[in-house]
């Protein structure tokens, strides 16, 4: 089930179940997971993309192992907020994933998440080689943390 609105997405989550954030690239998928209280995002791994079936199988395996309650996909909008080919690709991935799982799938505007991840890695004095290895799942962590913060804000104000 694809849910566009984060507030609606939150209503479909089971208490004490973590969620995953995904940063979909053309060559890799960055994966981050939350804690079961939905407060902290932790970068987990970078999945090397092969073909959809294999990529989805790995994501669903992570979901099963970690008992996840949903997926958030970073939506790479253009800086003016419009959606281009990368957004279309992300939405197509979500539609295909939706056919394989009952878990809710949501989207989060990921503008500048990779820039923020790169900056954090530079500040941590991470080598160029290591940055290349981890940038995608660190960016997924930024995407997921944005969602967790929003869900926490919604909960605090309800």
Image (cartoon, rainbow, N blue to C red):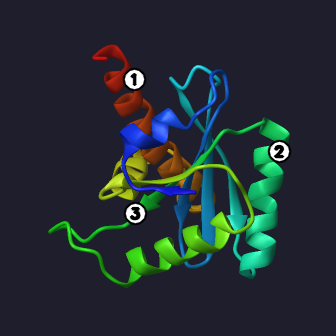
Residue 130 image-quadrant placement: bottom right
Q: Earlier in the sequence, mark 1 or mark 2?
A: 2
Quadrant including the N terminus = bottom right
Task: State the residue at coordinates (61%, 77%).
Answer: 27
Q: Residues within 10 Å of mark 2 (few under 14, many from 20)?
A: few
Tell me if residue 76 comes above or below residue 108 in the rendering: below
Local secondary structure at mark 1: helix
Closer to the camera in the image, 58 or 3: 3
Identify the disc placed on residue 75.
Answer: 3
Tell me if residue 27 comes above or below residue 119 in the rendering: below
5 to the left or right of 41 = left
Closer to the camera in the image, 66 or 103: 103
> In the rendering, at what x and y percent does residue 41 appear?
54, 33
Tell me if residue 81 comes above or below residue 143 in the rendering: below
Q: Residues within 10 Å of mark 1 (few under 14, many from 20)?
A: some
Identify the disc placed on residue 64.
Answer: 2
Task: State the residue at coordinates (53%, 26%).
Answer: 40
Task: State the residue at coordinates (47%, 42%).
Answer: 9
């Amino acid at each position: 089930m694809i849910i566009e609105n984060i507030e609606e997405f939150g209503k479909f989550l089971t208490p004490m179940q973590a969620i995953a954030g995904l940063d979909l690239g053309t060559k890799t998928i960055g994966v981050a997971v939350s804690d079961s209280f939905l407060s902290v995002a932790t970068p987990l791994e970078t999945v090397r993309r092969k073909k959809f079936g294999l990529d989805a199988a790995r994501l669903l395996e992570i979901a099963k192992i970690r008992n996840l309650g949903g997926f958030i996909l970073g939506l790479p909008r253009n800086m003016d907020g419009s959606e281009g080919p990368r957004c279309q690709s992300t939405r197509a991935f979500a539609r295909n994933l939706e056919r394989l799982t009952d878990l809710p799938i949501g989207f989060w505007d990921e503008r500048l998440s990779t820039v923020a991840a790169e900056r954090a890695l530079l500040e941590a004095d991470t080598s160029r080689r290591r940055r290349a290895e981890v940038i995608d799942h660190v960016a997924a962590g930024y995407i997921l943390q944005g969602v967790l913060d929003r869900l926490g804000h919604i909960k605090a104000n309800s």
